[in-house]
């Protein structure tokens, strides 16, 4: 624990009851003027942006992060209510298309400081070593310009800072977690029972939810509202795991600031700052370096909107790579009804999980794989699950009144990167006069085969546990890609250190840089990639070789 505190004191910078960031940190936060040339301006304060902010502030950099949403106060702003948490999601206008359009909003976008990790379930597995060379190993996807060992120390560091609780993990690179696994509820017990009967390995965790007091943060109270913002701050999000330490080391977080363009010096080709709107007024923040962390829709949108004589098709888009190869995960959910009460909403949604099917399996008609976790839809989401089966009226009421008897599992299927799954600018403009994003998505045959296989396994587990009825809803989860990391600018937007090929002092440190997505929630990997990028930047600064 002391090692964690020495590199990130955020957990000890909460109030004594853990309810909020120590008020003096926000009250005394350093404020830069627009015409101050800061060392680094970061666009977005989610998983990647907050990690980079904290690391660079610790290194002594003058750094400011701009976020389009609010600077949340969990005690005052969040409620234990499914409908009352709608404001946590990014609901600005967007267009969707393709053969298999992806709904955007509550399941894959965040609004405000902390980003989508405010309302993620807390599930934090690592990627496997095989994820970094799927093209070489499996003939699909893309190879990363880095390997698993390059990220391993950053996985370990971030797992300690969140912290992550779970069983010994036998899959991928076997490892342990900083905290012991949480006790499981009825949903988790049924997964364990069914998996054992079906001969499938299952473990408890990993979740970034404190199992015991951590600094001033309290332990989990198993209220089941992880997807609505953890009001007790037991669940990790950058708002409480990295922002407090960043503020304590002189960083500024500037909320309610919508960045619309990255400014470029036409003579040198270097980024000079960002243009943004706040309180109805347009500003330009000057900076020696710019880092973009707006995630997989807003980052390509910002780059494509930042046109100039040098970049007529959008910033960093010389080879038409911006916005391409955007991925989602197939995330079917299968529910089973049991005679006894389950009460699946009690406890964190991801309690028990399995990565038995994560890797490519010889003889199967598809490449790569999927993972399975417990999920626990609350009543509104459960109603959507039931309505997707065609039930309405009296039948819907019957299923809703039977809610306590259902258990639910969810899969994360590794859908493959395809260049035509992409973000472009639409004709419609938002309230700032900026073209909105259009996201076109179509599944390939391999994607569909994975969903079918994952659904079959989940049904087998639930029936083996004793379910007398099973129903499935097909859905998506987690966006990655759109500005991917690659070995060359013909294949991607940034290099192995998250630096843009085209603009020497521009970084991208969010999920858009991931070349593939595995069958894992991407939050931990995004934070690890950002922490590594920070280290590389600090090393370059210490050597006097910054671009």
Image: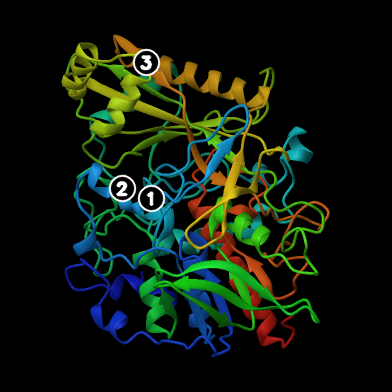
Q: Position of residue 402 (x, y in %)?
A: 18, 18
Asked if the residue under mark 3 is in contact with the one under mark 2, i.e. CB atoms within 8 Å, the reply is no
Q: Quadrant of the N terminus?
A: bottom left
Q: Measuring from the top left, give residue 253's x and y in whole percent.
A: 42, 75
484 or 122: nearer the eye? 484
Residue 281, position in %: x, y?
Answer: 45, 75
Q: CA distance from mark 2 to mark 1?
A: 6 Å
Q: Say if mark 2 contacts mark 1, CB within 8 Å.
A: yes
User: In the rendered image, which quarter is residue 198 located in?
Assistant: top left
Tell me if I can see residue 6 in this picture.
no
Residue under label 2: 86
Q: Secondary structure at mark 1?
A: loop
The residue indicated by pointer 1 is 89
Looking at the rendered structure, the secondary structure element under dot 3 is loop
The structure residue drawn at horizontal position 67% and vertical position 50%, both measured from the top left corner, is: 323
Residue 73 seen by the camera: yes
Q: Earlier in the sequence, mark 1 or mark 3?
A: 1
Instruction: Calculate the distance from the C-alpha at mark 1 to the C-alpha at mark 3.
Output: 26 Å
**Quadrant the C terminus occupies:** bottom right
Q: Determine which residue is flagged by label 3.
A: 389
Residue drawn at x 46%, y 61% as measured from the top left: 46
Q: Which residue occupies the foreground of this view, 187 or 332?
A: 332
Q: Are marks 1 and 3 in contact (CB under 8 Å)?
A: no
């Amino acid at each position: 624990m002391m090692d964690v505190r020495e590199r990130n004191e955020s957990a000890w910078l909460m109030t004594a009851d853990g309810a909020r960031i120590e008020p003096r940190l926000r009250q005394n936060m350093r404020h830069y003027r627009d015409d101050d040339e800061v060392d680094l301006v970061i666009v977005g304060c989610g998983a990647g942006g907050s990690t980079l902010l904290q690391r660079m502030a610790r290194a002594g950099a003058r750094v400011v992060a701009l976020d389009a949403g609010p600077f949340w106060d969990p005690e005052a702003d969040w409620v234990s209510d499914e409908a009352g948490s709608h404001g946590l999601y990014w609901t600005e206008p967007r267009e969707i298309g393709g053969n298999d359009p992806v709904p955007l909003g509550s399941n894959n976008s965040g609004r405000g400081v902390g980003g989508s990790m405010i309302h993620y379930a807390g599930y934090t597995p690592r990627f496997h070593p095989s994820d970094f060379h799927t093209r070489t190993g499996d003939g699909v996807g893309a190879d990363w310009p880095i390997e698993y060992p390059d990220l391993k120390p950053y996985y370990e560091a971030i797992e300690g800072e969140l912290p992550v609780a779970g069983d010994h993990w036998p899959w991928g690179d076997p490892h342990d977690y900083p905290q012991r696994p949480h006790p499981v509820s009825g949903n988790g017990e049924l997964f364990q029972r069914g998996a054992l009967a079906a001969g499938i390995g299952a473990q408890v965790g990993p979740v970034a939810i404190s199992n015991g007091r951590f600094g001033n943060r309290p332990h989990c109270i198993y209220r089941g509202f992880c997807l609505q913002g953890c009001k007790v701050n037991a669940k990790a999000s950058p708002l409480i795991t990295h922002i407090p330490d960043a503020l304590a080391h002189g960083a500024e977080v500037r909320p309610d600031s919508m960045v619309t363009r990255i400014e470029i010096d036409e003579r040198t080709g270097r980024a000079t700052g960002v243009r943004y709107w706040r309180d109805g007024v347009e500003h330009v923040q000057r900076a020696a370096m710019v880092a973009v962390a707006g995630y997989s829709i807003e980052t390509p949108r910002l780059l494509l909107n930042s046109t100039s004589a040098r970049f007529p098709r959008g910033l960093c888009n010389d080879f038409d790579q911006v916005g391409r190869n955007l991925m989602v995960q197939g995330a079917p959910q299968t529910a089973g009804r049991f005679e006894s009460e389950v009460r699946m909403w009690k406890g964190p949604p991801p309690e028990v999980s399995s990565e038995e099917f994560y890797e490519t399996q010889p003889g199967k008609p598809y490449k790569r794989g999927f993972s399975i976790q417990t999920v626990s839809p609350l009543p509104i989401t459960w109603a959507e699950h039931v309505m997707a089966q065609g039930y309405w009226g009296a039948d819907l009421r019957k299923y809703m009144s039977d809610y306590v008897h259902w258990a639910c599992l969810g899969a994360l299927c590794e859908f493959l990167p395809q260049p035509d799954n992409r973000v472009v600018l639409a004709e419609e403009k938002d309230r700032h006069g900026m073209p909105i994003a259009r996201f076109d998505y179509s599944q390939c045959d391999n994607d569909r085969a994975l969903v079918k296989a994952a659904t079959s396994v989940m049904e087998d587990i639930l029936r083996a546990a004793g379910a007398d009825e099973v129903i499935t809803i097909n859905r998506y989860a987690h966006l990655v890609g759109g500005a991917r990391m690659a070995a060359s600018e013909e294949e991607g937007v940034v290099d192995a250190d998250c630096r843009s090929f085209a603009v020497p002092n521009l970084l991208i440190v969010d999920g858009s840089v991931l070349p593939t997505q595995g069958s894992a929630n991407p939050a931990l990997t995004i934070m690890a990639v950002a922490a590594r990028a920070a280290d590389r930047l600090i090393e370059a600064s210490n050597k006097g070789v910054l671009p």
